[in-house]
Amino acid sequence: MSNVVTTAGVLPMEANFLTRTDVRSYARLNEIFNLQEDMRQTDGVKYHISLRMGERLSESNEWFKSDDAKDLMADEGIYWSKKEFVEKSTGISYTWFCKLIKASKQDDVIKSAYNRYNEEHNGTLSVEGLNKFASSVNLDELLAANEEEGLEDAIIDAVLLEEESELTENPTIETVFTISFKCESGNVAARIDVDGNLITTNSDAEIIDAITFLRSKLA
């Protein structure tokens, strides 16, 4: 069994409430603290642990909203908002709590497409990255327009199209070099950030063609 843990900044009666065996079970607190410990000790799998954390937090939140939870807290004279419950029971900031739950509830096909996208682009998996990836697509529209076996490809294509549009229209302040070229085969867009990273959805050959065109216009 996990050691009983409470966070800083709670009143004595709140601490007593949070150490109750039934409360810790209903609110999944032991599992949540175990996952937090795993994240401190495990390299390379924090993303996957974070998704499991989001699932446990979602279950904890569902219990908090229940009449049983409200009755238990009222018996102890405790009247928490959701934010207070999250931060006092787990030590997790409410902002991070919302991100974790949002990520854990993303559709499985979105998660699978996000994993593949990062493998193909040597990216790093993260909760924030998954949520941003999901926000770039309208899954209902893609479901209506594609067969199930082609859905992952359609999701990745939609994300790449969104990235190319952002790259062309909204270069960030961290960009030190940008090139945009419209040719017969389509648009070429690439940028280099302050760390020297090349960000593009185009091939090396397409970028070289754009640079060749630029050089041909120089005196």
Image (tube, helix red, strand yellow):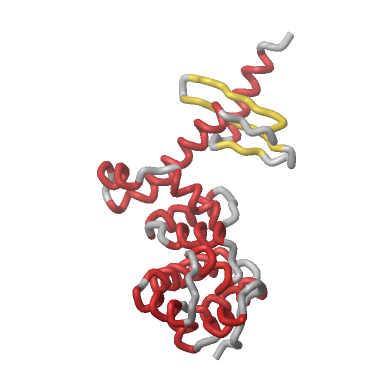
Q: Position of residue 197 (x, y in %)?
A: 69, 41
Quarter of the image holding residue 176? top right
The relative height of residue 177 versus residue 10 in the rendered view (above or below) is above
Q: Is 26 on the left-hand or right-hand side of 170? A: left
Q: Is 14 on the left-hand or right-hand side of 71? A: right
Q: Position of residue 198 (x, y in %)?
A: 66, 38
Query: Which of these two is toward me, 192 or 206?
Result: 192
Q: Give the quarter of the figure containing the C terminus.
A: top right
The relative height of residue 20 versus residue 51 in the rendered view (above or below) is below
Quarter of the image holding residue 209? top right
Query: Which of these two is toward me, 77 or 2?
Result: 77
- Is residue 45 at all visible to an observer of this figure? no
Query: Which of these two is toward me, 180 or 42?
Result: 42
- Residue placed at 45% from the left, 78% from the top? 73
- Residue placed at 54% from the left, 26% from the top? 169
Query: Which of these two is toward me, 105 or 97?
Result: 97
- Residue extending furthest top? 219
The relative height of residue 105 versus residue 189 in the rendered view (above or below) is below
Q: Position of residue 192 (x, y in %)?
A: 68, 35
- Residue placed at 56% from the left, 60% from the top? 96
